[in-house]
Amino acid sequence: MKYISTRGQSEPVDFVEACLAGLAPDGGLYVPEAWPQIAPADPNETYVDVAVRVLSAFAGDALSEPVLRELCTGAYASFSHHSVAPLVQDGPNSFVMELHHGPTLAFKDVAMQVIAKIYDHVLSERGERMSVVCATSGDTGGAAAAAFAGASNVDLYILHPHERVSPVQRLFMTTTGSKNVTNFAVQGDFDDCQAMVKAMFADRGFSQSVGLSGVNSINWARIAAQSVYYATAQAALGPDRPVRFVVPSGNMGDALAGYVAARCGMLAGFEVICAVNENRTLAALFETGEMRRTDAVPTPSPAMDISVPSNFERLLFEVSGRDGDAVRTLYERYKQAGEAQLPEQIRGPLGCAGFSASSVTNAQTMNEMKRYLVQTGELICPHTAVGTFKAHQLPASEAATVVLSTAHAAKFPETVLKATGMDAPLPKRCDALLDRGETFDIMPADLRLVKEAISGARLPA
Ligand SMILES: *Cc1c(COP(=O)(O)O)cnc(C)c1O
């Protein structure tokens, strides 16, 4: 199984190379050369069984099935619920898929736990070491810290914006106590963190000397690992039952994983509704075909404060008939002008791909957390509330509705309290978090200092 770039100008690579590289050298994202056909999940399979089958299909010869079984078994042992992604019914024909049973209480754990195991396995076989860098607005950094803590062949460097993540989010990143995890609290915002990570990748000399790698949501292995829970949801609801998935979306990795599950034959049909917050670029892309760079505005669902979602590029590649030239031209225009219009030959198929997107306001999100509590007795996180609000608005249908619950309410206690008047205590298994000491280095947003800290060498000013 080979992986090609959405911009058509990179050499095909295998699964492991695509995973370790993150971004393709031509600036595109890796996708499989052809969609493997994978048998739907069976309700008698465990989550690990399905994950092994799916990842084996995507890995091809790059990783053997026994190895994947060992890695997945280890990865999912860290979850507090044995079915990993349980479905909970919250109304007639209406369900929530809980993706927050991992160590850092957000769905990012589902893929990150496996990816960290893949990295460590591959690098130890090769006798190599890599530096994984990760800019985070909150959840990705915690998931990466938990997953890579103690890895023997990876040094993890997290860049988070100082005093701009929630206290609970910070604790998950700063209390691993592991020597191989370094956390920089950057005196700047998330964009400053992201810009420094991009600049480090662009510096070929630096990136090769420290063995730089990235695990943000453009990494193909994340999408592959996330397609698994769509398959287990379909199996739980019945193999032929039509399902519409409502996915709280930011960079669209989670929503795209649903598309992948469908393309590989694991779903009965395909309907994904992306629910976005007041950062509504994705909704505009579907409505008017206009891609426009704007500054993300802060909302109660910060993990979704994204302007143009990075994984949209993978969808464009598919609906354009896998036309790498068309995708490259579009992104070049967007890069130069800060805006671009999707051409007609893309807009047509985009409208028929089974996707839609719609935006939910801050007030609707806050009210929804209250409504959900009153009607079900359950607290939900603000990201999940964006999804359940949208689901509640949908016209009645034969199809079962499944909202992806992307984080635990306890990860955003300030917002939950404001919306509902209720405390959202951390689950018992996170007790240790509050007792452990925090380790992080406060740093100016200065690329040279960050590079020096990562390489351990002084660099010319
Ligand atoms: C990352 C994140 C999202 C958005 O997921 P994408 O794959 O980027 O669309 C939604 N909710 C939470 C809690 C997250 O951490």
Image: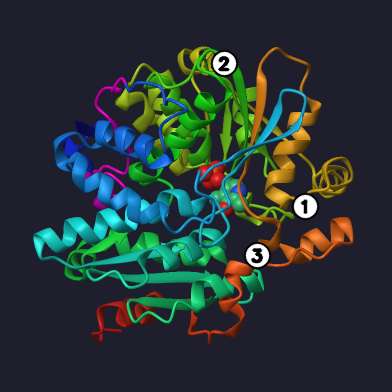
Work out whether residue 157 or residue 271 is closer to the camera in this orientation and state it: 271
The residue that label 1 is drawn on is 379
Q: Which residues are magenta?
A: 16-37
Work out whether residue 217 or residue 312 is closer to the camera in this orientation and state it: 217
Residue 354 lies in what quarter of the image?
top right
The residue that label 2 is drawn on is 351
Label 3 neighbour load within 10 Å: few <14, some 14-19, many 20+ = few
Residue depicted at 80% across the width and 46% down the height = 365
Q: Secondary structure at mark 2?
A: helix
How far apart marks 1 and 2 lie (CA) works out to 34 Å
Q: Residue 157, position in %: x, y?
A: 38, 71
How far apart marks 1 and 3 lie (CA) works out to 13 Å
Q: Secondary structure at mark 1?
A: loop
Amino acid type of the residue tagged 1 in the rendering: Leu
Label disc, if present, on residue 217 of the rendered structure: none
Quadrant location of the C terminus in the rendered image: bottom left
Quadrant location of the N terminus in the rendered image: top left
Label disc, if present, on residue 427 of the rendered structure: 3
Work out whether residue 341 or residue 267 is closer to the camera in this orientation and state it: 267
Q: Nearer the viewer, mark 1 or mark 3?
A: 3
Q: Is residue 156 left or right of residue 145?
A: left
Dot 1 or dot 2: first in sequence order is 2
Seen in the picture, residue 153 relative to 404 is either above or below; the reply is below
Q: Residue 39, position in %: x, y?
A: 35, 21
Q: Nearer the viewer, mark 3 or mark 2?
A: 3
- Say whether residue 278 is visible: no
